[in-house]
Amino acid sequence: MNQPLSSLSPGGRAVVAEIRIPPEHRARVLEMGLLVGTPVELVRFAPLGDPVEIRVRGYNLSLRKHEAELVLVTPRP
């Protein structure tokens, strides 16, 4: 079952299933390597919960919480 990336716990791993970010902002996320089928790991939330730090393709990437809510993932064990 797909869930928002922001709903993972720190250390949680998943695979990107769908990206619902509006087209005018989607290109930036895609250029950073966040594509459907890509494994991701939620590293941590900033102290106030925004931004969200994830690990994707061997590097860390920060997304605003509202962007992370628009990236749907399938959790992995």
Image: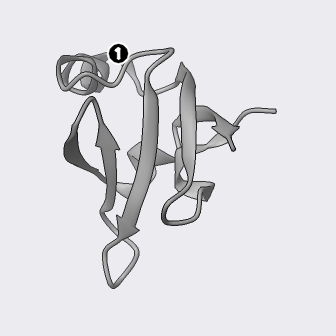
For the point 44% across and 47% down, the residue is 41
As drawn, the residue found furthest toward the right would be: 1
Query: Residue 55 lies in what quarter of the image?
Result: top left
Q: Residue 50's spot in the image, x, y percent? A: 34, 68
Task: Identify the residue at image location x=49%, y=61%.
Answer: 11
Quadrant where the image shows the N terminus: top right
Label 1: which residue? Answer: 23
Residue type (three-letter) at the residue carrying disc 1: Pro
**Left or right of 3, for residue 48:** left
Q: Residue lying farthest bottom?
A: 47
Helix, strand or loop under label 1: helix
- Depth order, front residue of 42/48: 42
Q: Position of residue 14 (x, y in %)?
A: 57, 38
User: Dividing the picture into quarters, in which one does residue 18 lie?
Assistant: top right
The colour scheme is one colour
Report the side of 64 relative to 66 (left or right). left
In the image, taking residue 71 as reference, residue 31 lies left or right, namely: left
At 19% across and 26% down in the image, what residue appears?
Answer: 32
Which of 74 and 63 lies nearest the eye of the viewer?
74
